[in-house]
Amino acid sequence: MPYQGDEAAFRSCVAEQIGFSSCQSDHPEIGPNDRRWALAHPDEVLGEGKEACRWLRTQPRAPRIRTDTGPYSYGDVAERYYQFSTRLDPYLSLSGQSTIVAEAGPTCAPRS
C-alpha cells in the first residue's frame, strides 16, 4: 500500500516540534542538534515518517478509553518503534525520533 498521508502536515508538525522536549533538560545540546539535522534532511525525515506510518498500521488498535500508561500509551508505542527502527540512530536522539513517530500518527492515511 503506498503512503497516502498528508506530507505537508507531517513536515510542518516535525519542523515545529523537533528539538523541543522537556526530556532533554539534562542534555540541552540534544534539541538544537536534532532540529538542525532534521531541518537539513527533510527527505530522510519524511522517509522515516512513512516507515512509522507503515509500522503504526501493523499495531493493534488502541481502545477508545486512553490512559497515560500501558501498551497503548505514547511512551510504550514509541519504545516499540525504537526497537523496530534504527536508521536514524546515528543522527537523531531518541527524543528526536519520538517526535517523528508522534507526528506521523495523526498525518498517516486512515486504516481501511
Image: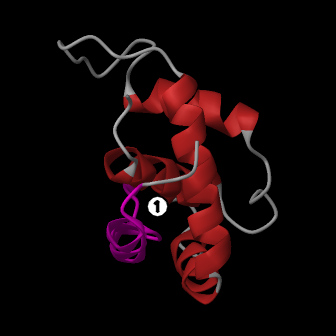
Apparent side of residue 22 relative to residue 48 in the rendered image (left or right) = left
Where's residue 101, x and y in %?
50, 48
Apparent side of residue 4 relative to residue 38 in the rendered image (left or right) = left
* 61 and 1: which is toward the camera: 1
* 8 and 72: which is toward the camera: 8
* 58 and 83: which is toward the camera: 58
- Would you say the magenta stretch is mainly helix, strand or loop? helix
Q: How crowded is mark 1: few (under 14 residues within 10 Å), some or many (20 or more)?
A: few
Residue at image location 58% in from the left, 85% down from the top: 36
Residue at image location 38% in from the left, 31% down from the top: 111
| Numbered range of the magenta stretch | 5-22
Locate the N terminus by quadrant: top right
Indicate the quadrant where residue 85 lies: top right
Residue at image location 44% in from the left, 52% down from the top: 104
Q: In this view, does 37 lie above or below 74?
A: below
Label 1: which residue? 25
Where's residue 13, x and y in %?
34, 68
Residue furthest to the left? 65
Q: Count all numbered tags in the image, as a single digit.
A: 1
Q: In this view, does 18 lie above or below 78?
A: below
Locate the C terminus by quadrant: top left
Is 14 one of the magenta-colored residues?
Answer: yes
Residue at image location 19% in from the left, 14% down from the top: 64
Indicate the quadrant where residue 39 lies: bottom right
Is 103 one of the magenta-colored residues?
Answer: no
Where's residue 78, x and y in %?
53, 35
Apparent side of residue 13 relative to residue 42 in the rendered image (left or right) = left
Scheme of colours in the image: secondary structure
Give, as a three-letter code, the residue at label 1: Ser
